[in-house]
Amino acid sequence: MRVSPERILALLDRPERPALATHVLARSMRAGHGAVRIIESILRELERKGRVERSRGGWRMAQRGALVSAECRQEDDGRLVAVDEVGRATADAGVDAGFHRGGEVLVARGSQGVPSLEAALAEYRHFGFGDRYRLIDAAELDTRVRIAGAVQALVCDDTAVVHPGRLVRGLARAVEREGTRIIEGTPVTVDSPDSTTVVGRIVGGAEVAVNVAAVPSNPGGNRIEIYGREGTMVLRADGSFNTGSSQLLAGRGKEPMAPIPAPAKYAFAPEGTPAGQPYNVAQAYARAAGALLSRGSFDVDFDLAVRRHKLIDAIERSSATGRTVTLAQ
């Protein structure tokens, strides 16, 4: 990889600013991808010039031979400066990294959570930066965000969010606009299959064909097709069956497929629950509550997890040996 940290330093005006930005970035991305190596090369160059120093937690700014963040308060000050500098650097370079300084909110939903917030505030004060945090009541929290059951919150207005991948990509493109070539050839090791196809026969004698694929773009969603003697049923979803809304269709004989409602006996969520993820979560809670009250079993339990893992293990053994694997009932 050939990259010039000098060009990046020149682009961002002041030499200490990239160090602060990359301090946040290097600690956020430790996957070993090429983008991280670019950042590390910048940090090593800055270390050589005495502008940053290595620490147990990553990299820190150096000043007059000593660490700026030698104490907890100073380290926290450095992080806050880094937040501002990341925002400034991305704005100056025209990088859309999703930077947003909206603060941090830790919420207690019920009186049982209040001692935890108070303990956290006491710890912050002990280390010298408790003035950055404050406890607010439910009424003030409601002006920021509405959370059902919230009674108190611990807030800090000095934090921000940024998308590390978009930040690296945006900075790389900004440098390239200045004439620098970044040559990235890190190989990507695929350690899981992109497509899995399974063909089998269930206990009742029906044959099943399953295809699961991870596609790079324009996925077709999820689809389950059931073909019987008298007709066909299809369950489809644009996203995941677990998190998104789905559609049920059916057709008898040669009649065209048409949407049908799910039978009422499978509806457990209260009427008026929003569709999609809220409905799915409400369904799970309602079924779990029913199982607890009746002292019955909940169908997503440990036994089901064991059966699923046995099935996955059988699929892997079949793929490795090229033979049919029969599972015990």
Image (cartoon, rainbow, N blue to C red):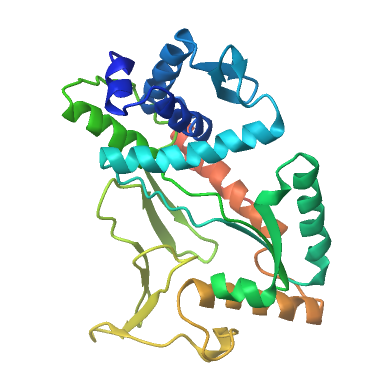
Q: Residue furthest top?
A: 48
Question: Could you say which is closer to the camera, residue 296 or residue 281?
Answer: 281
- The quadrant the N terminus occupies is top left
Above or below for 154 versus 141: above
- Marks counted in the figure total 0
Residue 75 seen in the figure = yes
Q: Residue at x 40, y 49 (%)?
A: 99
Q: Is residue 126 above or below residue 321?
A: below
In this rendering, is residue 162 above or below 247?
Answer: above
Image quarter of residue 107: bottom right
Q: In the drawing, does residue 59 fall left or right of residue 249?
A: right
Provide residue 185's location: percent of width, then percent of height.
28, 20
Q: Is residue 235 left or right of residue 74?
A: left
Q: Name the residue located 17 percent from the left edge and 30 percent from the top edge.
A: 177
Q: Position of residue 214 (x, y in %)?
A: 35, 47
Residue 148 visible at all: no
x, y percentage for residue 210? 39, 55
Quadrant where the image shows the C terminus: bottom right
- Name the quadrant containing residue 46: top left
For the residue pair 71 and 206, the one nearer the viewer reads as 71
> Residue 269: x, y in percent?
58, 84
Q: Residue visible at 63% across and 37% down?
A: 76
Residue projecting furthest to the front: 64
User: 38 left or right of 323?
Assistant: left
